Image (cartoon, grey):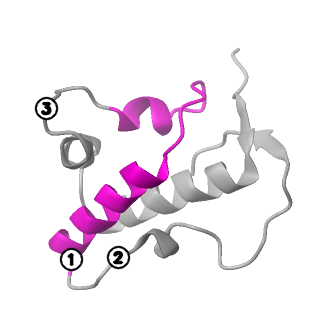
Amino acid sequence: MRKPVKISSIDLYIINTVRAIRKILNISQREVSKAINNLTDNNILGPIESQYHKETYNDEQLNKIADYYSKKSNRNYTLKDFYPKSALKEELVDKLII
């Protein structure tokens, strides 16, 4: 059985937070992928939300996601909503998506 890849604890927190909000707003991976880059049909969230791929978000993508989430909800999302409220221990952790 394949093991999950290792990523930084901060990256894991961000991925799980973006995913949790996406699910609350009932938005598909494909919709968010289109919001990030409408010129391609690729689902970039698939690898990001997979425990077997090292892909993570960058701030440009997170900014576009915050803008899209804001349009789909009745609140204003910013990059700050995806980052931890307090410092996390800087370490590599298994990429376990919740």
Residue under the point 73% across and 23% down = 3
The answer to whether residue 67 is above or below residue 91 is: below
Per the rendering, the mark at residue 73 is 1
Say which element carries label 1: loop
Q: Residues within 10 Å of mark 2 (few under 14, many from 20)?
A: some
The answer to whether residue 76 is above or below residue 19 is: below
- Check contact, mark 3 vs mark 1: CB within 8 A: no
Specify the segment rendered in magenta: 44-73
For this rendering, which residue is in front, 37 or 29? 37
The percent coordinates of residue 63 (x first, y second) are: 36, 61
Specify whether residue 53 is painted magenta: yes
Residue under the point 53% across and 32% down = 55
Residue for badge 3: 39
The percent coordinates of residue 98 (x first, y second) are: 57, 52
- Check contact, mark 2 vs mark 1: CB within 8 A: yes
Residue under the point 39% across and 74% down = 78
Say which element carries label 3: loop
Q: Is residue 81 left or right of residue 60?
A: right
The percent coordinates of residue 80 (x first, y second) are: 50, 74
Whichever of callouts 3 and 1 sits on the residue coming sooner in the sequence is 3
| Mark 2–mark 3 distance (CA, rounded to whole Å) | 24 Å
Specify whether residue 64 is painted magenta: yes
Main secondary structure found in the magenta portion: helix
What is the quadrant of the N terminus in the image? top right
Residue for badge 2: 77
Q: How many marks?
A: 3
The kind of residue tagged 3 is Leu
The kind of residue tagged 1 is Ser
The kind of residue tagged 2 is Tyr
Residue 5 figure quarter: top right
Whichever of callouts 2 and 3 sits on the residue coming sooner in the sequence is 3
